[in-house]
Amino acid sequence: MDEIETKLMEELILKGAIEFAGIDDETGEMLYNFSNKIKDIMPELYEIHLSTINKDIMYFWEKGFVDIDLFLDNPSITLTEKAFNNKEIASLDIDKQRSLKEIKRIVTA
């Protein structure tokens, strides 16, 4: 992370738009989540984040890692057996592996 990104991150943490979420088991890096305040503080970042999440969920649905029940008032996402298959996960590029790990963390929370 460069100096500008670091300062922006610090500012968002102080404003409550980003919250500490834990530590990555593999890398030891600190993990953060957006709070609901991000919508008001940086709506454009919130929209980019939502778009990225939606693309990732559609990707994992198309590849069989998640199921989506679109017929509910509030569509639900469930993980398939493939989402826990280490061989299948290893076949994904590292960014998709990280995205799947985050989706799994959110869905099982």
Image (cartoon, grey):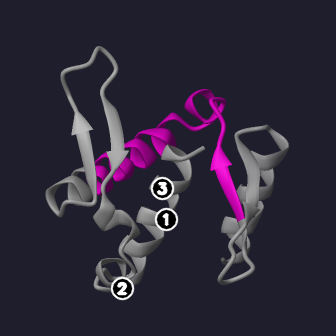
Question: Residue under circle 2?
Answer: 90
Q: State the residue lying farthest toward the right.
A: 14
Task: Assess disc 1: are there few (<14), some (14-19) or many (≥20) residues with their C-alpha within 10 Å of its C-alpha.
Answer: some
Label 3 – label 2 distance at C-alpha: 15 Å
The magenta segment: 31-57
Labelled disc at residue 104: 3
Q: Are marks 3 and 2 in contact (CB under 8 Å)?
A: no
Q: State the residue lying farthest toward the left.
A: 62
Q: Residue at x 19, y 60 (%)?
A: 64
Label 2 – label 1 distance at C-alpha: 12 Å
Q: Are marks 2 and 1 in contact (CB under 8 Å)?
A: no
Question: Residue under circle 1?
Answer: 101
Q: State the residue lying farthest toward the top.
A: 73
User: Which amino acid type corresponds to the residue marked 3 in the rendered image?
Assistant: Lys
Q: Is residue 77 left or right of residue 62?
A: right
Residue 78 % position (x, y): 35, 44
Q: Are marks 1 and 3 in contact (CB under 8 Å)?
A: yes
Q: Is residue 67 left or right of residue 99?
A: left
Q: Residue at x 27, y 60 (%)?
A: 65
Quadrant where the C terminus sits is: top right
